[in-house]
Amino acid sequence: MAAKIKIWFDAEADFLEVRFSDAAGFERESAHDAVMERVDALGNVIGFSILGVSRFRKERPLEADLPAA
């Protein structure tokens, strides 16, 4: 895991993005319909994003697997 992460939240779009690396990458679908993985050219997860983040409450947290390459 990286020493630093970058987190962006857009309240108007209800969108959260977390990046573990500034490396070039692309988004791909995950097993969870609200989560997109950000991966590098080798398929390593370097971040993720969540759409509709406000629908996940403390009582029912979002759970998603971010598999290694």
Image (cartoon, helix red, strand yellow):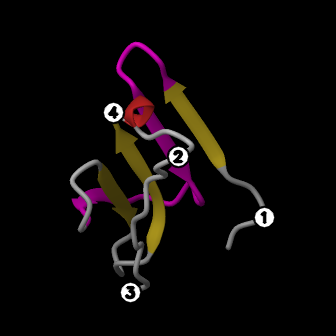
Q: Which residue is mark 2?
A: 59
Can you name the residue that lies furthest to the top here? 12
Residue 38: image quadrant is bottom left
Q: Which corner quadrant holds the N terminus?
A: bottom right
Q: Nearer the viewer, residue 55 or 65?
A: 55
Residue 58 at x, y percent in the picture = 57, 43
**Amino acid type of disc 4?**
Gly
The tag on residue 3 is: 1
Q: Nearer the viewer, residue 1 or 56?
A: 56
How far apart are the alpha carbons under marks 1 and 4? 27 Å
The tag on residue 69 is: 3
How far apart are the alpha carbons under marks 2 and 4? 16 Å
Q: Earlier in the sequence, mark 1 or mark 4?
A: 1
Q: Which residue is mark 4?
A: 52
* Secondary structure state at the residue bearing disc 1: loop
Residue 8 at x, y percent in the picture = 55, 33
How far apart are the alpha carbons under marks 4 and 3? 26 Å
Residue 52: image quadrant is top left
> Which residues, given as a range, are shown in magenta?
10-30
Q: Earlier in the sequence, mark 4 or mark 3?
A: 4
Q: Is residue 36 left or right of residue 58?
A: left
**Amino acid type of disc 2?**
Glu
